[in-house]
Amino acid sequence: MNVFSSPEYVASAHAFDTTRKAEWLAASLSRTPIRDIDLVVPQPLTATQVATVHDIGYVQAVQTGIPRDLAESQGFAWDDGLWSMVLASNGGVVAAALDALEHAVSGSLSSGLHHARRERGDGYCTFNGLAIAAKCALDAGADSVLILDLDAHCGGGTASLIGDDERIWQLDTSVCGYDSYESSRRASVKVVANAVDYLDEIRASLNMVAKLGPPFGLCLYNAGMDPFEGCGTGGLPGITGEMLAERERMVFEWCREHSLPVAFVLAGGYVGGQLTEDALVDLHRLTLTAAAHPA
Ligand SMILES: [Zn+2]
């Protein structure tokens, strides 16, 4: 299984989980490899590709740092490295999506995608690689795309970007109302309040979309680990590492059962509180392990 990543994913000077965790994961994989995973450097996106989803004025602000408040609307201090970082990490999402169409399962060590909107960033998300990759997959011949968003926070940015295309659906099970939106036929959001309901809600949503949705040609999986109870940003008491391991097995097994190619990205998960860097890396490794070796 190919997993896309490059040193450019962490090129921003602004040090934060979203701008550093790809490096943490890559180092962990080099120390303790997961069988059958190859790290591959993706082609970065071009400004033109980003502008298929984002307003050109916003794209140029991220490139140049001017105006500064727009360039920093995701919440990072701007520097030269931000532009190459987001072109590389969003390029990795597109590369993983196209690779999954060919090889059934793929991924990218990207994060910071789902809150980004057409004309600005938000919530540590600069460009919305999920929406960009969904459109690229359709261009490459996928009939329709399911974006599965299990980050702790809702994917309102993505929902705002897919409304114009009947072929893109979003299934969003969150544990925190941040960036929530009104559910529609194609983009449904559910905020789970009790950990005991978490896995059942995800299972029910997957069963529902299998019944009501079109025959999907690709699943883009935003595999946030911030629902973990020890995560200070988004964590829900009672959601354990074992439950997240079970979630990952369920998602990749569901994709396999439905012969649905799947490309994952890392998404949320933040060091602090009761979550060390090593523990966060171990949580994200659950996704890679389940993707490479579905039950
Ligand atoms: Zn999140």
Image (tube, rainbow, N blue to C red):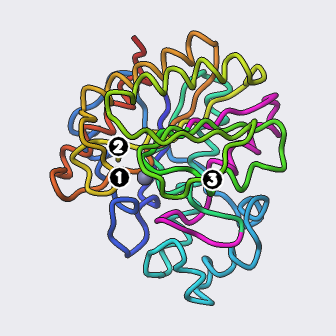
Residue 111 point in image, percent of width and height: 46, 52
Q: Contact (CB < 8 A) between labels 3 and 1? A: no
Check residue 120 for magenta coloring.
Answer: yes
Q: Amino acid at mark 2?
A: Pro
Q: Is residue 62 left or right of residue 134?
A: left
Residue under numbered circle 1: 234
Residue under numbered circle 3: 181
Quadrant in the picture for residue 31? top left
Disc 2 secondary structure class:
loop
- Mark 1 surroundings: few (<14), some (14-19) or many (≥20) residues within 10 A: many
**Camera-nearest residue between 185 and 107:** 185
Q: Amino acid at mark 1?
A: Gly
- Mark 3 surroundings: few (<14), some (14-19) or many (≥20) residues within 10 A: some
N-terminal-most mark, 3 or 1: 3
**Camera-nearest residue between 105 and 200:** 200
Residue under numbered circle 2: 227
Q: Vertical placement of 217 versus 193: above or below? A: above
Disc 3 secondary structure class:
loop
Real-space CA distance between mark 3 and mark 1, rounded to the nearest whole angstrom: 17 Å
Disc 1 secondary structure class:
loop
Check residue 73 for magenta coloring.
Answer: no
Q: Residue at x 56, y 72 (%)?
A: 83
Q: Vertical placement of 214 versus 59: above or below? A: above
Q: Tag on residue 20? A: none
Q: Amino acid at mark 3?
A: Tyr
Q: Contact (CB < 8 A) between labels 2 and 1? A: yes
Q: Which residues are magenta?
A: 119-148
Real-space CA distance between mark 2 and mark 3, rounded to the nearest whole angstrom: 19 Å
Q: Contact (CB < 8 A) between labels 2 and 3? A: no
Mark 1 C-beta to ligand 1 under 8 Å: yes
